[in-house]
Image (cartoon, helix red, strand yellow):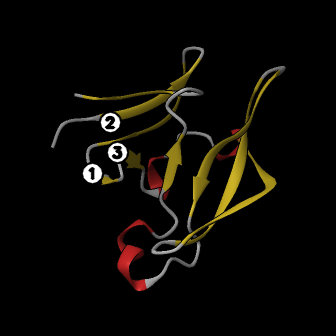
Amino acid sequence: MPLATASLNGTTLAETDTWETVEGNIYFPPESIKDKSLFKPSDMTTYCPWKGDASYYNVVIGDKTIRDGAWYYAHPYDAAIKIKNHIAFYKDKVDIKSA
């Protein structure tokens, strides 16, 4: 499998050669996150009828904060169990590449 990366302003947020793709989004496994201190829990939550409740992170690099730039499913429904705790990023907020 090729390498997938998520970066922001030259800082690599996640990098992996194993990931899941769901609805066009790359879900990075938790161990692929390079610096967990850049991820601050957000109060934002959303609901998907087949995945469950999503929680969000604000991504903070220096003085720049990307509000709700990443999300994950801590307790997904059975249909989405393969993305449990995997982190996805908004493509319009974070640079995502797979090659």
Q: Quadrant of residue 53?
A: bottom right
Q: At 55% from the left edge and 26% from the top edge, which residue is drawn?
A: 92
Q: From the top left corner, tell me how far across and down residue 42 is, in percent.
A: 80, 52
Do the numbered discs 1 and 3 sit on residues whose CB atoms are within 8 Å?
Answer: no
Dividing the image into 4 quarters, which one contains the N terminus? Answer: top left
How many residues crowd mark 3 within 10 Å: few (<14), some (14–19), many (20+)?
few
Amino acid at the residue labelled 2: Ala
**Is 53 in front, or is 17?**
53
Q: At 73% from the left edge and 61% from the top edge, which residue is drawn?
A: 45
Q: Write down the residue under mark 2.
A: 4
Amino acid at the residue labelled 3: Gly
Above or below for 1 versus 22: above
Q: Write down the residue under mark 1.
A: 18
Q: Secondary structure at mark 2?
A: strand
Q: Write down the residue under mark 3.
A: 24
Q: Residue furthest left?
A: 1
**Is 64 in front, or is 33?**
64
Q: Earlier in the sequence, mark 1 or mark 3?
A: 1
Exactly how many numbered labels are in the figure?
3
Q: At 40% from the left edge and 45% from the top edge, which residue is drawn?
A: 25
Do the numbered discs 2 and 1 sit on residues whose CB atoms are within 8 Å?
Answer: no
Left or right: where 57 falls relative to 75: right
Above or below for 34 versus 28: above
Q: Secondary structure at mark 1?
A: loop
Q: At 26% from the left edge and 35% from the top edge, which residue is drawn?
A: 3
Amino acid at the residue labelled 1: Thr
